[in-house]
Amino acid sequence: MSVVESPLGRVVSVTIETSVDRGSTSFSVLVPSVNLNGHSATVSTVGITTLHRIGIGPMTGQLDVYSETPLIGTAESRIIPLEEEAGAGAARV
């Protein structure tokens, strides 16, 4: 995974497939800045799937092929506990 700050916002990328003879596929999402001020906010952005082509011998033409996925969701501030409280997950009889 890589995280890069850019003029577009934060770009988070992961490799989702790698092939020795065909190349790799990665997915990147542009994460915009959001000001919540204690509230939630609708966020829309884009995910980009990139096919990075390689081959045996010289290749001509475009080597990276992009496809776009529109994304929409809700940003909100949450406190996530790092550890479960002792006994909180225990079954009661």
Image: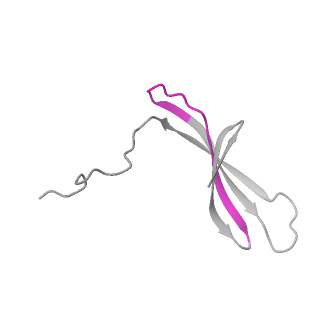
The N terminus is located in which quarter? bottom right
Residue 78 found in image quarter:
top left
Q: Look at the image and say whether residue 36 sits in the magenta stretch.
A: yes
Report the front residue among 29 and 67.
29
Give the residues drawn in magenta, as a range. Answer: 22-43
Residue for point 44% across, 35% down:
77
Residue for point 69% across, 64% down:
24
Residue for point 86% across, 73% down:
57
The C terminus is located in which quarter? bottom left
Image position, residue 55 (x, y; %): 80, 71
In this view, which residue lies farthest toward the top? 37
Image position, residue 35 (x, y; %): 54, 28
Q: Is residue 55 above or below residue 33?
A: below
Residue for point 86% across, 67% down:
59
In the visual, does 33 lie left or right of 5? left
Residue 30 found in image quarter:
top right
In the visual, does 86 lie left or right of 5? left
